[in-house]
Amino acid sequence: MIWTDYFTLIKVRPGRIVTPRFGTLDFSDPNLPVEKVHALFEDDFPYLKITPLGMDTLFPVPPLAKLPSKKLESRTPARKPVKRKA
Amino acid sequence: MDFADIGKLLTDGKNLGGLANRIYFGLWNDVAAWPTDPSAPATIELAGTQTGDLVMKAGKRMFELYTTEDAAKLDINVIGEEAGKGYELLLHVFAPGLHKKLLGFMNATKNEDLVMIAQDSAGQNYLMGCAIRSAKFSASDGSGTGSTTDGRRGLGMTFAYRSANLYVYSGNIPLTEAIGSV
Protein backbone atom coordinates (compact mmCIF):
# COMPACT_ATOMS: atom_id res chain seq x y z
CA MET A 1 0.00 0.00 0.00
CA ILE A 2 1.19 3.53 -0.73
CA TRP A 3 0.31 6.71 1.12
CA THR A 4 -2.14 7.85 -1.55
CA ASP A 5 -4.32 4.83 -0.72
CA TYR A 6 -4.82 6.32 2.72
CA PHE A 7 -4.66 10.06 2.11
CA THR A 8 -5.48 12.58 -0.60
CA LEU A 9 -3.51 15.77 -1.13
CA ILE A 10 -5.86 18.76 -1.12
CA LYS A 11 -5.63 22.52 -1.83
CA VAL A 12 -2.29 22.21 -3.70
CA ARG A 13 -0.95 20.39 -6.74
CA PRO A 14 1.24 17.36 -5.99
CA GLY A 15 4.71 18.71 -5.27
CA ARG A 16 7.07 19.83 -2.53
CA ILE A 17 5.98 21.27 0.80
CA VAL A 18 8.36 22.28 3.58
CA THR A 19 6.98 20.87 6.82
CA PRO A 20 8.15 21.90 10.30
CA ARG A 21 8.34 18.27 11.38
CA PHE A 22 10.01 16.47 8.45
CA GLY A 23 11.52 19.22 6.32
CA THR A 24 10.79 19.17 2.59
CA LEU A 25 8.53 16.36 1.42
CA ASP A 26 7.62 15.73 -2.21
CA PHE A 27 3.95 14.81 -2.35
CA SER A 28 4.24 13.81 -6.01
CA ASP A 29 6.31 10.86 -4.79
CA PRO A 30 4.09 7.80 -4.22
CA ASN A 31 6.84 6.25 -2.10
CA LEU A 32 6.59 8.72 0.76
CA PRO A 33 6.50 6.67 3.97
CA VAL A 34 2.92 6.21 5.15
CA GLU A 35 4.09 6.74 8.75
CA LYS A 36 5.30 10.25 7.93
CA VAL A 37 2.11 11.22 6.14
CA HIS A 38 0.06 9.70 8.95
CA ALA A 39 2.02 11.75 11.51
CA LEU A 40 1.44 14.94 9.50
CA PHE A 41 -2.27 14.20 9.32
CA GLU A 42 -2.35 13.83 13.09
CA ASP A 43 -0.52 17.19 13.36
CA ASP A 44 -3.47 18.83 11.51
CA PHE A 45 -1.44 19.26 8.31
CA PRO A 46 -3.81 21.37 6.19
CA TYR A 47 -3.10 19.69 2.84
CA LEU A 48 -4.29 16.16 3.60
CA LYS A 49 -7.64 14.45 3.60
CA ILE A 50 -8.06 10.88 4.72
CA THR A 51 -9.63 8.30 2.40
CA PRO A 52 -12.25 5.77 3.57
CA LEU A 53 -9.56 3.06 3.37
CA GLY A 54 -7.21 5.22 5.47
CA MET A 55 -9.96 5.72 8.01
CA ASP A 56 -10.64 1.99 8.25
CA THR A 57 -6.96 1.01 8.35
CA LEU A 58 -5.33 3.72 10.42
CA PHE A 59 -8.18 4.69 12.70
CA PRO A 60 -10.18 1.49 13.14
CA VAL A 61 -13.23 1.79 15.32
CA PRO A 62 -13.15 -0.92 18.00
CA PRO A 63 -16.27 -3.08 18.09
CA LEU A 64 -18.77 -2.01 20.70
CA ALA A 65 -18.32 -3.92 23.92
CA LYS A 66 -21.37 -5.84 25.03
CA LEU A 67 -22.95 -4.41 28.11
CA PRO A 68 -23.63 -6.90 30.87
CA SER A 69 -27.29 -7.76 30.79
CA LYS A 70 -29.12 -6.10 33.58
CA LYS A 71 -32.78 -5.84 34.21
CA LEU A 72 -33.81 -2.29 33.96
CA GLU A 73 -36.45 -0.95 36.24
CA SER A 74 -39.30 0.03 34.05
CA ARG A 75 -41.50 1.35 36.75
CA THR A 76 -41.50 4.96 37.74
CA PRO A 77 -40.62 5.28 41.41
CA ALA A 78 -43.63 5.90 43.56
CA ARG A 79 -44.21 9.50 44.49
CA LYS A 80 -43.80 10.45 48.07
CA PRO A 81 -47.00 11.70 49.63
CA VAL A 82 -46.89 15.44 50.20
CA LYS A 83 -47.59 16.38 53.77
CA ARG A 84 -50.06 19.18 54.02
CA LYS A 85 -50.19 21.60 56.83
CA ALA A 86 -53.19 21.24 59.04
CA MET B 1 -0.30 36.84 30.40
CA ASP B 2 1.87 35.58 33.24
CA PHE B 3 5.63 35.91 33.14
CA ALA B 4 7.71 32.79 33.73
CA ASP B 5 11.31 31.91 34.55
CA ILE B 6 13.49 31.50 31.46
CA GLY B 7 16.31 28.97 31.75
CA LYS B 8 19.03 28.00 29.30
CA LEU B 9 16.52 26.06 27.18
CA LEU B 10 19.00 24.44 24.82
CA THR B 11 17.63 21.11 23.67
CA ASP B 12 20.47 18.55 23.88
CA GLY B 13 22.92 21.45 24.03
CA LYS B 14 22.16 22.46 20.43
CA ASN B 15 22.58 26.10 19.50
CA LEU B 16 24.24 26.33 16.09
CA GLY B 17 24.24 29.75 14.48
CA GLY B 18 23.48 30.79 10.94
CA LEU B 19 20.70 30.08 8.49
CA ALA B 20 19.86 27.04 6.41
CA ASN B 21 21.13 26.96 2.83
CA ARG B 22 17.72 27.79 1.44
CA ILE B 23 15.40 30.69 1.96
CA TYR B 24 11.86 30.89 0.67
CA PHE B 25 10.26 33.79 -1.16
CA GLY B 26 7.05 34.74 -2.89
CA LEU B 27 5.06 37.75 -3.96
CA TRP B 28 3.14 39.48 -1.18
CA ASN B 29 0.16 39.87 -3.54
CA ASP B 30 0.03 36.11 -4.08
CA VAL B 31 -0.74 35.36 -0.44
CA ALA B 32 -4.35 34.41 0.25
CA ALA B 33 -4.14 34.03 4.03
CA TRP B 34 -1.58 34.81 6.69
CA PRO B 35 -0.83 32.98 9.91
CA THR B 36 -2.39 34.46 13.02
CA ASP B 37 -0.42 36.51 15.54
CA PRO B 38 -1.02 35.62 19.17
CA SER B 39 -3.90 37.50 20.78
CA ALA B 40 -3.93 37.76 24.56
CA PRO B 41 -1.55 34.78 24.85
CA ALA B 42 -1.59 32.87 28.11
CA THR B 43 2.19 32.35 28.27
CA ILE B 44 5.30 34.18 27.08
CA GLU B 45 6.07 31.22 24.81
CA LEU B 46 2.75 31.65 23.03
CA ALA B 47 3.48 35.38 22.78
CA GLY B 48 6.33 34.50 20.42
CA THR B 49 4.52 32.05 18.16
CA GLN B 50 2.27 32.50 15.15
CA THR B 51 -0.38 29.89 14.48
CA GLY B 52 -1.78 28.65 11.19
CA ASP B 53 -0.34 28.55 7.71
CA LEU B 54 0.71 30.92 4.98
CA VAL B 55 -1.79 30.08 2.23
CA MET B 56 -1.19 31.11 -1.37
CA LYS B 57 -3.81 32.15 -3.94
CA ALA B 58 -4.85 29.63 -6.59
CA GLY B 59 -2.07 29.04 -9.10
CA LYS B 60 0.55 30.65 -6.84
CA ARG B 61 3.30 29.18 -4.67
CA MET B 62 6.39 29.98 -2.64
CA PHE B 63 9.85 29.52 -4.16
CA GLU B 64 13.27 28.47 -2.95
CA LEU B 65 16.55 30.41 -3.22
CA TYR B 66 19.88 28.75 -2.55
CA THR B 67 22.32 30.70 -0.46
CA THR B 68 25.99 29.95 0.18
CA GLU B 69 26.92 28.24 3.44
CA ASP B 70 27.75 30.71 6.23
CA ALA B 71 26.83 33.66 4.00
CA ALA B 72 23.25 34.19 5.10
CA LYS B 73 22.02 35.66 8.34
CA LEU B 74 18.99 37.23 9.93
CA ASP B 75 19.53 40.40 11.94
CA ILE B 76 16.89 41.48 14.42
CA ASN B 77 17.08 45.19 15.21
CA VAL B 78 14.92 47.25 17.53
CA ILE B 79 13.52 50.39 15.94
CA GLY B 80 11.37 53.28 17.10
CA GLU B 81 11.26 55.64 20.00
CA GLU B 82 10.05 55.18 23.55
CA ALA B 83 6.52 53.74 23.58
CA GLY B 84 6.74 53.17 19.86
CA LYS B 85 9.29 50.41 19.63
CA GLY B 86 9.17 47.64 17.08
CA TYR B 87 11.56 45.48 15.10
CA GLU B 88 13.29 45.44 11.78
CA LEU B 89 14.30 42.08 10.40
CA LEU B 90 17.15 42.16 7.91
CA LEU B 91 17.72 38.99 5.90
CA HIS B 92 21.12 38.85 4.23
CA VAL B 93 21.72 36.17 1.59
CA PHE B 94 24.47 35.44 -0.88
CA ALA B 95 23.51 33.51 -4.00
CA PRO B 96 26.56 32.16 -5.83
CA GLY B 97 27.12 32.69 -9.54
CA LEU B 98 25.94 35.50 -11.72
CA HIS B 99 23.66 33.44 -13.89
CA LYS B 100 20.75 34.94 -15.79
CA LYS B 101 18.12 33.44 -13.50
CA LEU B 102 19.70 35.14 -10.51
CA LEU B 103 20.05 38.49 -12.24
CA GLY B 104 16.43 38.19 -13.32
CA PHE B 105 15.42 37.49 -9.73
CA MET B 106 17.15 40.65 -8.56
CA ASN B 107 15.60 42.68 -11.38
CA ALA B 108 12.14 41.34 -10.62
CA THR B 109 12.26 41.79 -6.85
CA LYS B 110 14.08 45.09 -6.35
CA ASN B 111 10.89 47.17 -6.31
CA GLU B 112 8.41 44.43 -5.44
CA ASP B 113 6.39 43.62 -2.33
CA LEU B 114 7.64 40.27 -1.10
CA VAL B 115 7.10 37.63 1.52
CA MET B 116 10.14 35.72 2.74
CA ILE B 117 10.80 32.89 5.16
CA ALA B 118 14.21 32.15 6.64
CA GLN B 119 15.05 29.01 8.57
CA ASP B 120 17.76 29.01 11.21
CA SER B 121 20.07 26.15 12.12
CA ALA B 122 17.67 25.06 14.85
CA GLY B 123 14.92 24.60 12.26
CA GLN B 124 12.92 27.62 13.41
CA ASN B 125 11.24 29.63 10.66
CA TYR B 126 10.88 33.41 10.60
CA LEU B 127 8.23 34.91 8.36
CA MET B 128 8.92 38.32 6.84
CA GLY B 129 5.62 39.80 5.72
CA CYS B 130 2.13 40.16 7.14
CA ALA B 131 -1.31 41.23 5.96
CA ILE B 132 -0.40 44.92 6.07
CA ARG B 133 3.32 45.01 5.40
CA SER B 134 5.66 43.26 2.96
CA ALA B 135 9.35 42.43 2.90
CA LYS B 136 11.38 44.66 0.58
CA PHE B 137 14.62 44.35 -1.29
CA SER B 138 16.72 46.78 0.69
CA ALA B 139 20.36 46.60 -0.39
CA SER B 140 22.95 44.63 -2.28
CA ASP B 141 26.19 43.88 -0.51
CA GLY B 142 29.12 42.01 -1.96
CA SER B 143 27.48 41.54 -5.35
CA GLY B 144 29.71 41.13 -8.36
CA THR B 145 32.56 39.09 -9.70
CA GLY B 146 34.99 39.53 -6.81
CA SER B 147 38.42 40.99 -7.52
CA THR B 148 40.55 37.85 -7.32
CA THR B 149 40.16 34.34 -8.66
CA ASP B 150 39.53 33.09 -5.12
CA GLY B 151 37.01 35.90 -4.55
CA ARG B 152 33.32 35.42 -4.27
CA ARG B 153 31.25 35.71 -7.45
CA GLY B 154 27.55 36.15 -6.99
CA LEU B 155 24.79 38.32 -5.63
CA GLY B 156 24.56 39.49 -2.05
CA MET B 157 21.09 40.73 -1.20
CA THR B 158 19.42 42.16 1.88
CA PHE B 159 15.68 42.09 2.46
CA ALA B 160 14.00 44.15 5.16
CA TYR B 161 10.71 43.79 7.01
CA ARG B 162 9.37 45.86 9.89
CA SER B 163 7.12 44.31 12.46
CA ALA B 164 5.51 45.26 15.75
CA ASN B 165 6.52 41.93 17.30
CA LEU B 166 8.81 38.95 16.78
CA TYR B 167 7.42 35.50 16.11
CA VAL B 168 8.40 32.01 15.11
CA TYR B 169 6.43 30.79 12.11
CA SER B 170 5.32 27.24 12.83
CA GLY B 171 3.37 26.51 9.65
CA ASN B 172 4.19 24.84 6.35
CA ILE B 173 5.76 26.35 3.23
CA PRO B 174 4.03 25.26 0.02
CA LEU B 175 6.51 25.02 -2.86
CA THR B 176 3.74 23.73 -5.08
CA GLU B 177 0.86 25.66 -6.64
CA ALA B 178 -2.29 26.21 -4.63
CA ILE B 179 -5.55 25.08 -6.21
CA GLY B 180 -9.10 26.11 -5.43
CA SER B 181 -8.01 28.72 -2.93
CA VAL B 182 -9.06 32.39 -2.72
Image (cartoon, grey):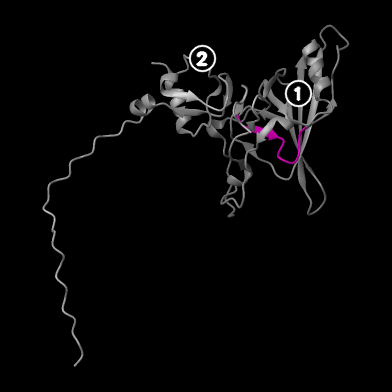
Badge 1: how crowded within 10 Å, few (<14), some, or many (20+)?
Answer: many
Q: Main secondary structure of the magenta part?
A: loop
Q: Which mark is residue A29?
A: 2
The residue at 56%/29% (across/down) is A20
From the top left corner, tell me how far across and down residue B165 is, in percent: 70, 44
The residue at 85%/24% (across/down) is B140
Q: Residue furthest right?
A: B147
From the top left corner, tell me how far across and down residue B123 is, in percent: 60, 28
Q: State the residue in front, A8 or B120.
A: A8
Instruction: Determine the chain carrying the residue at label 2.
Output: A
Instruction: Determine the chain carrying the residue at label 1.
Output: B
What span is in magenta? B123-135
Q: Is residue B45 visible?
A: no
Residue carrying label 1? B93
Disc nearest the viewer among 2 and 1: 2
How many angstroms separate mark 2 from mark 1 (CA)?
30 Å
